[in-house]
């Protein structure tokens, strides 16, 4: 298995632009998580899905952030419009179950908004 | 909501020295997980502990779950430069819906 695949690995964009991050979870994993990591705030859960349905999006910072999972093999996290404070590493993770299995993280997308 | 705390925040050791990081929760945890993140990398699942007082070993790493299931520790014997990274513990949130990650302990190993 190729693991959790994220793209792009790096993204540099100008303030105000739309940014779309992509994730392909491990086949058969029913749960998909989007995390943001910064030095100041550590690993923050933004949203997670179970069987393609969003379960908890309370971690999404504001309306500029949206996430979708149109099918079991693909998810997107979109920021529109982007701001410099959105600069962070965004990780996607997947898991067989939510509370009794380890999470498999992707390699992350390093986002820089200038 | 559920929070797990970790100490220390940073640890610098000489290669060959031992290292321990501690994870604490204000509430009882049904289970706890540990992850390692290398510099520039992503968190990698190491282990899950479930039973009160449980001790598990992975080569030079020893993981322990407290009797009250409110704390856990990770001990590394004779550190090597390959142990460099940030070690996170994670415990289920109040609803058991997902894992909440601690702030991590960043380990530096001086050769």
Image (tube, coloured by chain):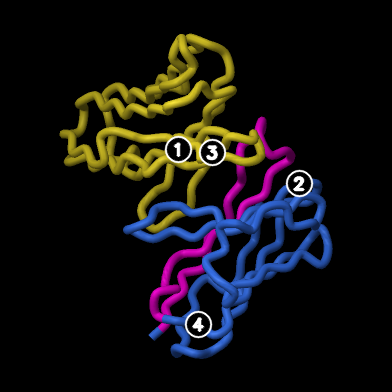
Chain colours: A blue, B yellow
> What's the CA distance linking mark 1 and mark 3?
19 Å
Residue, disc 1: B3
Which residue lies at the image location 27% right of the left edge and 30% below the top edge?
B79
Check if mark 2 and mark 3 are on a common chain. no
Q: Which residues are magenta?
A: A84-113
| Disc 2/disc 3 C-alpha distance (Å) | 15 Å
Q: Nearest the camera: A93 or B91?
A: B91
Residue assigned mark 3: B45
Q: Nearer the viewer, mark 2 or mark 4?
A: 4
Whether residue A107 is in magenta: the answer is yes
Task: Determine the chain carrying the residue at label 2.
Answer: A
Residue A61's x, y, as percent?
Answer: 52, 66
Q: Residue at x 48, y 9 (%)?
A: B53
Q: CA distance from mark 4 to mark 3?
A: 31 Å
Q: Which residue is mark 4?
A: A82
Q: Which chain is disc 3 placed on?
A: B
Secondary-structure class at tag 1: loop
| Crowd class of label 3 (few under 14; some 14 to 19; many from 20; radius 10 Å) | some
- Tag 4 and tag 1, C-beta contact below 8 Å: no
| Residue A68 as seen in the image, left or right of residue B89 | right
Q: Residue B72: x, y in percent? A: 42, 22
């Amino acid at each position: 298995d190729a693991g959790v695949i994220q793209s792009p690995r790096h993204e540099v964009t100008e303030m105000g632009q739309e940014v779309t991050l992509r994730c392909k979870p491990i086949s058969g994993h029913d749960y998909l998580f989007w995390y943001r990591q910064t030095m100041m705030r550590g690993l923050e859960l933004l949203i997670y899905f179970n069987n393609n349905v969003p379960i908890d999006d309370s971690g999404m910072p504001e309306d500029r952030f949206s996430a979708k999972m149109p099918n079991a093999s693909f998810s997107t996290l979109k920021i529109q419009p982007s701001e410099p404070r959105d600069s962070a590493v965004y990780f996607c993770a997947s898991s067989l179950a939510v509370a009794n299995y380890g999470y498999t993280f992707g390699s992350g997308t390093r986002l820089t908004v200038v | 909501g559920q929070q797990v705390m970790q100490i220390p925040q940073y640890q610098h050791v000489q290669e060959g020295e031992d290292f321990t990081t501690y994870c604490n929760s204000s509430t009882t945890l049904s289970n706890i997980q540990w992850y390692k993140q290398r510099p520039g990398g992503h968190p990698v699942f190491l282990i899950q502990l479930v039973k009160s007082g449980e001790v598990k070993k992975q080569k030079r790493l020893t993981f322990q779950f407290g009797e009250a299931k409110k704390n856990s520790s990770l001990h590394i014997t004779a550190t090597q430069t390959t142990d460099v990274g940030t070690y996170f513990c994670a415990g289920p949130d109040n609803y058991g819906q997902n894992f909440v990650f601690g702030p991590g302990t960043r380990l530096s190993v001086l050769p």
